[in-house]
Amino acid sequence: MNSSHNYIADYSQVYNEVPLIPLHYDQVVWLEGAECVTPEVMAATWKPQSAACLNAVLNSRFCTPFYISKLQDAHQQATILREENVDNLISINDKVCPSNIVKMSKGGEAEVRNLDNLIFFTEMAKCDNFGIVLNLSDSLDYLGQYLQEKRARFNSIRLCISAESGTPLATINQETAFQFEDISQHVNRVSQIGDEQKINLVFADLNHSNELSAKRELVSLCITALKLLGDGGMFVCHVCETLTRFSVGLLYIFHHIFDKLTIVKPVMSQLSTPQRFLVCKGFHGDNKHYAAYLEEVLHQLTMLANEGSAFDVVEIVPMQLLYGEQFYTFVKQMNEQLAHVQLQTIVQLENYFLYPDKMPSAEEIFDLREEVTAYLK
């Protein structure tokens, strides 16, 4: 490598004519919204479908089998990902991972705080600019504090699932506004809040590594967003994989009740993980039957969980609808691009671990730090 090399730009290399990691707003690929399903058609043709529980996603209709099998192999075989090598992984990432470089440059703080020169977050909610999303780290923790510091003049709320209790929490200005004993209570309380005051922006944090075990939490957060958002509002959700027909069914629902949506893997996130951000803009608030249907899905998920059933809800939208050309192509392409980035990053980390002489030099690491700083500004 030489000093003129642009390392950050490498992350936006083109795959199938689309950048793998969008670095700027004009590189983001959006899926335009579709016509809503009427309540009558939904009642007649949509019903949550159950099947035997799965322990892992071994194949998917929404991603080429090559990527799924290669990622499974990588996780099983990569020595750098083994528990005993976690300190080595952190050490390598501190040198070559953009998000870790930012954390190190901030004296070890986990938040990306150098946001002043980006488009202000209110503009992200109001129009076609969402530059700040491209610079998110691994979670949405710091955004609430940032909004408070900037005295945001619009209503926003952050939702997450408590790591201690597993129950939903709602946070405004970094303070817990309310918490719930169970998800059912959460949904009822949110209904009351939604009737009193509509929110312009909901950002939800599903900090979970397995989409199979996070269905109840994800549906709960989605119901919350639909009940709280006002017309034209925006929903940003930190999710894990989107490979199952259950998860893709949720995407399909949002495809119909927002003007547009996208799935983003920011360059500032951990590229070796499957996690990504769902961004939906332009909410259509007059489609309450979608939220009502998701409550039916949540009820069935809760009932099966309480029974300790060997069955799980695996489909929430009729499968044939998910094969619509525009929608299917978008989801499959996004899944494959993100799998490509994840696999490429794991292979690179493994090579750095097994062959230390391949690690970037001190000069190259310095150049990368400079580029990360410049990119955030």
Image (cartoon, rainbow, N blue to C red):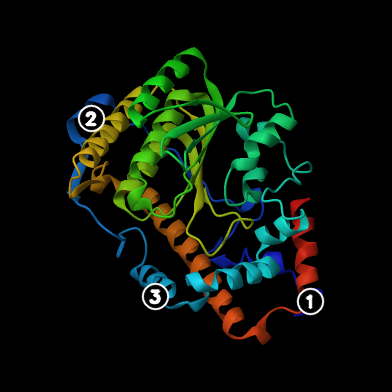
Question: In this view, which residue lies farthest toward the top?
Answer: 196
Point out residue 37 in the picture as x, y percentages from the top left corner.
31, 31
Quick check: 307 left or right of 287? left
For disc 1, the marked residue is 362
Seen in the picture, residue 59 relative to 377 is either above or below; the reply is below
Point out residue 155 in the picture as x, y percentages from the top left corner.
60, 23
Q: Along the line of sight, which residue is nearer the eye, 115 or 173?
A: 173
The quadrant of the picture occupied by the N terminus is: bottom right
For disc 3, the marked residue is 73
Contact check, label 1 and label 2, Cβ < 8 Å: no
Neighbour tally class for label 1: few under 14, some 14-19, many 20 plus, Cα within 10 Å: few
Q: Along the line of sight, which residue is nearer the eye, 36 or 225?
A: 225
Point out residue 331 in the picture as x, y percentages from the top left corner.
41, 53
Quick check: 25 left or right of 223? right
For disc 2, the marked residue is 41
Q: Nearer the viewer, mark 3 or mark 2?
A: 3
Q: What residue type is labelled 1?
A: Ala
Is residue 129 visible to the viewer in this orientation of the structure?
no
Neighbour tally class for label 3: few under 14, some 14-19, many 20 plus, Cα within 10 Å: few
Q: Give the residue drawn at x 42%, y 70%.
A: 71
Please report whichever mark, 3 or 1, sits nearer to the chain's N-terminal start: 3
As helix, strand or loop, the secondary structure at mark 1 comes to: helix
As helix, strand or loop, the secondary structure at mark 3 comes to: helix
